[in-house]
Amino acid sequence: MRVVNKVSELISATGVWNDALIRRLFGREEAEIILTIPLSRRTMPDRLVWKLEKNGEFFVKTAYRFSFSHSSSRIPFTLSVNESFWKRVWKVLIPNAAKVFAWRVCHDILPSLERLAMRHVQVDSQGCVLCEGSSESTLHLCRDCPFTRQVLQGHVMLQRTCFAPQVEECDLLTWFNYCVKSLSLTDLGTLIFLLWSIWKERNSRVWEGKKALACDVMLRAAARLQ
């Protein structure tokens, strides 16, 4: 029996499928499928193309996204906020890195110690790095941590809104949604930037061993916002 190593060997000199050869080498169903594949009339050399990128080049990130989106274990995640919520978040005049931080907060995907433990990452303790007290969750870092409260209390509108009695016991997204709706764009930008600064201070303590006071974090953030 003839051995075929390349697809081109299944194509006749006239540029059409070699019907007899294909039916001899493959089963009936497979042969029918192959014969329905259209062949190009142009005599151009073959080249590898990654269809998930416009330029045809392969990137690991698009392969990961495709694999993740088609995974049977993937659980669809939707947020109970509308389009106007995101428009206000993206509209504030602060660095894009701070806006991305807000996006991660809303999706509760910051690598806090509690989140890492939930992902089965080995951590020595789940206690908050900043206050060394309660479990370090995203909500704790953004609202309930005494260190965070010290930073935000220097801004009257933020203190009044973020720690309003009606949302003090709410979940993370409900609380943040209330802040987005209640604050002006300027104050919202200040809130996001301060929370981002607090997160950076937390990481500085973890990775660099440096420790700043809440007032220092607030003053540095205020100076940069100016």
Image: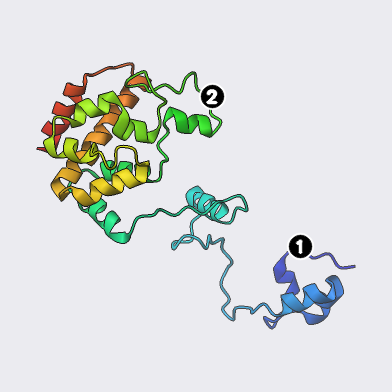
Q: Nearer the viewer, mark 1 or mark 2?
A: 2
C-alpha gap between disc 1 and disc 2: 49 Å
Q: Amino acid at mark 1?
A: Asn
* Image coordinates for residue 88, horizontal then vertical, percent: 23, 54
Camera-side residue of 29 and 136: 136
Q: Amino acid at mark 2?
A: Gln
Give the residue at x 73% y 75%.
34
Q: Quadrant of the N terminus?
A: bottom right
Camera-side residue of 18 and 180: 180
Residue with the mark numbered 2:
122
> Is 5 situated left or right of 212 in this image?
right
**Residue 130 visible at all:** yes
Q: Total label count?
A: 2
Q: Which element carries disc 2, helix, strand or loop?
A: loop
> Is 15 situated left or right of 158 in this image?
right
Give the residue at x 21% y 22%.
214
Residue 21 image-quadrant placement: bottom right
Give the residue at x 26% y 28%.
148
Q: Quadrant of the C terminus?
A: top left
* Image coordinates for residue 12, horizontal then vertical, percent: 73, 79
Residue with the mark numbered 1:
5
Give the residue at x 25% y 51%.
89
Relative vertical location of residue 17 with respect to residue 212 in this rendering, above or below: below
Which label was assigned to residue 143?
none
Residue 30 image-quadrant placement: bottom right
* Residue neighbourhood size for the residue with mark 1, other residues' Cα within 10 Å, grouped as few (<14), some (14–19), many (≥20): few
* Image coordinates for residue 50, horizontal then vertical, percent: 53, 60
Q: Which element carries disc 1, helix, strand or loop?
A: loop
